[in-house]
Amino acid sequence: MMTITIEKLYEFYINTIKSCGTYLLSSNDSVIGYNIFEQFDIGAVSFLHRDNLQKLFETGLINDEVMNKSLTLRSEFLKLQQSDEWNINAVRNSSVWRQVLNLADEINSLVERYAKQSCRA
C-alpha cells in the first residue's frame, strides 16, 4: 500500500472542503452533481476521516475547531447519502443540505484564517 505525504494529504483535504459550499447554489446541475456527488463524496469518505484529520491536527496543519467541524461535516454528509435527499434538487432546496453547505463554508473560512495565522508565526 502506498502512503501519501502529509503535504499531499493536506492538499486533498483542502480540495475536498473547497468542492462543497453555498457557492454551488448558483451553479448548474452538472457542476453541483460533479462537486457534491463525485468530488466531495470521495473526499469526505477519505480525507475527512478521523485518522486523516488527526494526522493533519498533529502536524499543526489544522486546529481542533477545524478538525471537529470537519468530523461533523463528514457525519452529516454520510447521513444524507442514506436519505431521500441524495439528489441535486434536495441540495438546492433542503434545509439539511443548506446546513452542510454552510458548515463547509465555515470550515473553508477557518482553514484560510488558520493558514494565514500559521504563516505569520
Image (cartoon, rainbow, N blue to C red):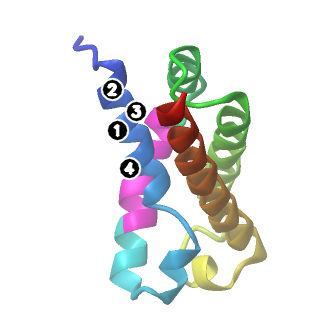
Report the residue marked by disc 3: 10
Residue at (27, 14) in percent of width and height: 3
Discs 4/2, front: 2
CA gap, disc 1 and disc 2: 6 Å
Label annotation for residue 23: none
Magenta stretch, main secondary structure, is helix
Report the residue marked by disc 4: 15
Between disc 4 and disc 2, whose residue precedes? 2
Looking at the rendered structure, the kind of residue marked 4 is Asn
Mark 4 touches mark 1? (CB < 8 Å) = yes
Residue at (49, 52) in percent of width and height: 17
Between disc 3 and disc 4, whose residue precedes? 3
Secondary-structure class at tag 1 = helix
Label annotation for residue 7: 2
* x, y percent for residue 22: 58, 74
Label annotation for residue 11: 1
Q: Can residue 88 be seen at all in this image of the molecule?
A: no
Pointer 3: residues within 10 angstroms few (<14), some, or many (20+)? some
